Image (cartoon, helix red, strand yellow):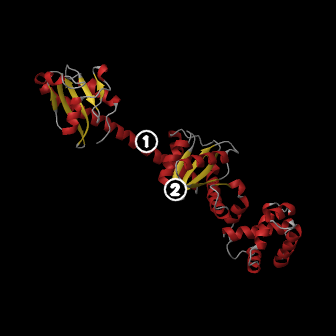
Amino acid sequence: MLRYVTKELAQKIVCRTMEIIDCNINVMNEKGVIIGSGDKNRIDHIHEGALMVLKNGSPYEITQQQADLLRGAKPGVNLPIFFNGEIVGVVGLTGLPEQIRNYGELVRMAAEMIFQEMIFQEMILIEEIQWDERLKEEVVHQLLRQEEPLDSLFFDRTNRFDINLYLPRVALIVTAENRHKVMKRVKKYITNNDLYAMLPDGVVILKSIEAGSASSYAEQLEKQLRASGMVCKLAAGSVQADFKGLHISYQQAKDTLAVGSKLHPEAVFYCYSDYQIPVLLRQSAGFQENHELLHHYEKLKEYDKKKELIETLTVYIEENGEGSTAAKKLFIHRNTLSYRLDKIQSITGKDPRKVKDLLELYVALLLSKIS
């Protein structure tokens, strides 16, 4: 059974139909509760006659004698309100059935016409909202592509929706198995100045935000999505001063998500500011398997069957070249660490103790993971 008849709509039916006939009109919902009436004291009471109409799907009359026996009922005629072949409510006329019976069908038809009119208006409103949503998404698509100068139609649309293009924004990508579910949830956590769209790689939010607060917003959003039972990953590009750089922020977010998922697959949020070097490598042409710097890693991998040297180099980089902290993290003696660093130098020709050589070894490790 459809549940379309609200109290507001029911009262409109009452007011209009009581202009047609001089008697009290009641409108009951699908549970037989009076939700609209010319007699305010009867609202929210159960109507036994309506229950009979809902049960049998046909009109039901209550005589004065029957009314005396039924709870909350008065004599009258009660008729089903149909929409698309289903009963959506009941309209009742208060009075002696023999006096008002002839008006019953007229009131029922009027109630159905009012109901259909309201539903039609609501459908038009929904279509207008959906159309506006699509146009707003097209604005986002154009901002993210920006392969050519934006035309006058684009600016006409932004003016129509009162979009301020000159606010600082950051591109955020939210990925999950069900993009539609994410999109529905994301809409609850955006402000008037935020823009969003659903793309093949996920839901994109162009978040209006102050510089430096992109991480905190994304982390809060991820927590809210996780609390809703969604497993997702998020990535943020850099904050851009206005609309002209949003396609850059979006590309950064895409690349950050790609490299972050490989370097730290256990994480759920990746920020471009934390992955600038691997993103730069990903964006640079010709960094694939044949890159010369990869040879350093391949040499280590070929020699290092137990992967001790690769692990040592990784921890040494993570600890910023601090030998003492690296040795503690590896649970080895400083002398053992020194021996392994010497071994890495002899295999690769690069000394991890020198900044330039360490940078090349670091790049080699990154390339091995993201290529």
* Above or below: residue 249 compared with residue 281: above
Nearer the observer, 225 or 132: 225
> How far is the residue under mark 1 from the one under mark 2?
20 Å
> Which amino acid, mark 1?
Ile
x 71%, y 69%: residue? 367
Q: In this view, does 71 lie above or below 332?
A: above
| Above or below, 70 relative to 153 | above
Farthest right residue in view: 335
Q: Position of residue 222 (x, y in %)?
A: 59, 49
Number of dots carrying numbers: 2
Q: Which mark is residue 274?
A: none
Q: What element carries label 2?
A: strand
Q: In which quarter of the image is residue 30?
A: top left
Residue type highlighted by circle 2: Leu
| Residue 129, disc | 1
Can you give x and y, in whole percent of width and height, for residue 357 in the image?
A: 84, 69
Q: Mark 2 points at which residue?
A: 199
- Please determine whether, in this image, residue 108 is positioned above or below residue 222: above
- Quarter placement of the C terminus: bottom right
Q: Which residue lies furthest to the front in this view?
A: 69
Q: Position of residue 211 (x, y in %)?
A: 70, 44
| Residue at figure coordinates x 31%, y 24% from the top left | 43
In the rendered structure, which disc, 1 or 2, sits on the residue that comes first in sequence? 1
Within 10 Å of disc 1 (Cα), the crowding (few <14, some 14-19, many 20+) is: few
